Amino acid sequence: MKTIYEPGKHIPIVDEADVCVLGGSCTGVFAAVRAARLGAKVVIIEKQNCFGGVATLGLVNIWHSLYDAEFKKQIISGLTEEVVERLEKRSAVRKNSNSPSSAFNLNTEELKIELDQLITESKVKPYLHSFYAAPVVEGDRVKAVIIENKSGRQAIAAKVFIDATGDGDLCYHLGLEHFYAEAIQPPTSCAKLYYGEKLHGFGWQKAIAEKGEEFGLAEDWGWRTFVPGMPNTFMHAETHVFNVDCADAAQLTYSEIEGRRQVRALMDLARKYGPEDVLALVSLPAAIGIRETRHIKAEYQLTERDLLSGTKFHDAVAYGSYRVDIHHADCKGITFKYLDGTQEVIRHGKKAVSRWREETADSPTYYQIPYRCLVPPKFENVLFCGRMIDADPGAFGAVRVMVNLNQLGEAAGVAAFLALDSALPVAEISTQKLREVMAKGGSIIFD
């Protein structure tokens, strides 16, 4: 590879903080807010023009249940529930009772503004349209990060850094051990579509299976849902871009363009083979919905066995009941595994129901995620939270959804504050104290 020499530069330090969060998804925002509410000076870096990640930029407007698998015991609260309550005041959320597929439909345009409000109220210093570029390291500590924005190349110094970039960019640049799943869950370009009553009953997936090849669409599996406050407007996630690694710049570029092409192809298919009706494209995502790229090795790897057996952890900081949900990398299907031992495999438009284990008298109704999954084995002032979590494919298929990752963001924010307050490396803080402070801040914490 040819190279160009870039002379050394003196880079201005534009901010010095207690905590610097890289990535402004809900996970990153919640990390920043929790640290700031405890008194830390916090900055957050986001490369796009708004916060919310896949929820806002990717148009994915559902959050899953805050209750156990039987819908009897609430297991999630904190900032996820707080944001839902705030959106309710603006008629920007609809609740769905006892659904394993979605508990809340959100108007994610309103969510953008609500996250702005959270950041502002908490006195977090935001940097939008700002790209994280590189770390500055001294020994086993990160001293600063380099960012690029309209004002040029700048540095932000901090005492603790939280990597919430999704792809684990900071951890990757630090040389921390990482890995890829053997079969990466493929990304999806969602879209908001407006159409009339005649198209409400149109079989989108059946049409893709039967006629998709004519429009360059592979046989696929997808879903759709409504948008609160917008009659006849639906969010569609019907297709995937297969065999790509969106942590690679060239493949990410291809994925964005191919994803948008698929949306147009889907609409062309519906116009030709669906009932004659109005059909209009309302919006496309600002970023493709990435399900999985690299994973960062942590002090502990969460396993499918841990999750589906309801393993308890002394340092549990998050809970979930969402099923294992694996989008097939070889196209045409999805696998669901439930805590009660049942599973569903959907391929070629057909659903097969079976058991992944023998039936037992009792089954766990939720699972736990330990703090150790956020702590890398090196660099005493770095934490990570988000879909780069150290988990095997089965565990990742469940914990990757937003209501779970939101909690991990809150845990990282509180842990960062405690590391500062106790003058300890992030790996050595008291996890009992972490859990106590999280509970005082509104999180549900139990054994």
Image (cartoon, helix red, strand yellow):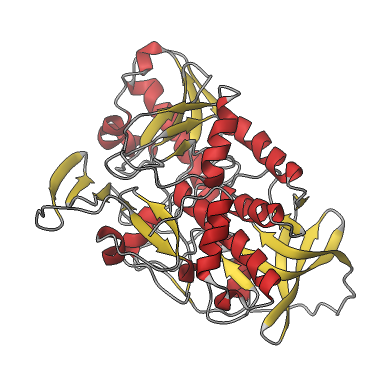
Residue 161 is left or right of residue 398, and the answer is right
For image coordinates 58% across by 58% down, the residue present is 437
Above or below: residue 224 compared with residue 352: above
Above or below: residue 420 compared with residue 377: above
Q: Position of residue 260 (x, y in %)?
A: 52, 40
Q: How many marks?
A: 0
Quarter of the image containing the C terminus? Answer: bottom left
Q: Position of residue 157 (x, y in %)?
A: 79, 69
Who is closer to the viewer here, 445 or 121?
445
Q: Position of residue 36 (x, y in %)?
A: 71, 54
Mark yes or no: residue 54 visible.
no
Q: Position of residue 218 (x, y in %)?
A: 33, 44
For image coordinates 40% across by 21% down, the residue present is 271
Quarter of the image containing the N terminus? Answer: bottom right
Residue 310 is left or right of residue 437, and the answer is left
Who is closer to the viewer here, 55 or 210?
55
Mark yes or no: residue 277 visible.
yes
Q: Quadrant of residue 185?
A: bottom left
Who is closer to the viewer here, 404 or 72?
72
Q: Quadrant of residue 118?
A: top right
